[in-house]
Amino acid sequence: MSMRHVVKKANSIADQMTSATRNQVLSLYMRVFRIARGWQSTLSQDTESERRYIVQEAQTLFRQNQQLTDQESIKKCIDECEARIEIGLHYRNPYPRPIYLPIMGLATQKGRKLKAQQRMRKQAKPVYLQSHDEDS
């Protein structure tokens, strides 16, 4: 993917934001693609698949959040992106780290206990996994 194409997509994603927020989102979007372009896997045979994953994940998440207008929601997405970048670079692994559920997190009970467990599961979700569904 050419840098011109990436810039064009990034501009369309950030059209509706304030100038400062828009610049921050564009900067993050470009940073993710620079990281993908230079990514080296710990196993050389996985490098290309991990690069593709980084690009596809970025495109998916940026498009998914493209229509956000609430500054607080945008800030949460920016924080998530920055956290995922730092974790990925630190551990040399582009995939999200696993989430550890609270005690009784996988119980199949119905009613009040299930609602309490769902609330606990949502509260326990780290910032770098906010955009992922439970099924992911």
Image (cartoon, rainbow, N blue to C red):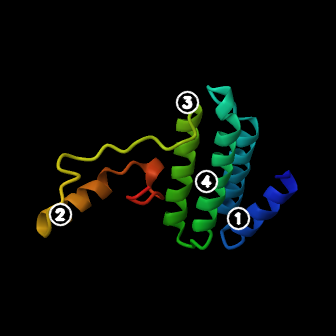
Asked whether, in this view, residue 36 is left or right of residue 81, the answer is: right
Between discs 3 and 1, the one toward the N terminus: 1
Residue 17 visible (yes or no): yes
Tell which tag, 3 or 1, sits nearer the viewer: 3
Residue at 68% of width from left, 50% of height from top? 55
Q: How far apart are marks 3 and 1 (CA)?
A: 30 Å
Between discs 2 and 3, the one toward the N terminus: 3
SS under mark 2: helix
Q: Where is residue 102 in the image (x, y as percent from the top left)?
A: 23, 47
Quadrant in the picture for the C terminus:
bottom left
Residue 14 visible (yes or no): no
For badge 1, the amino acid type reads Ser
Between discs 2 and 1, the one toward the N terminus: 1
The label number, if any, that marks residue 90 in the structure image: 3
Q: How many labels does the image show?
A: 4
- What residue is disc 4 on? 57
Q: Position of residue 81 (x, y in %)?
A: 56, 50
- What residue is disc 2 on? 114
The label number, if any, that marks residue 19 in the structure image: 1
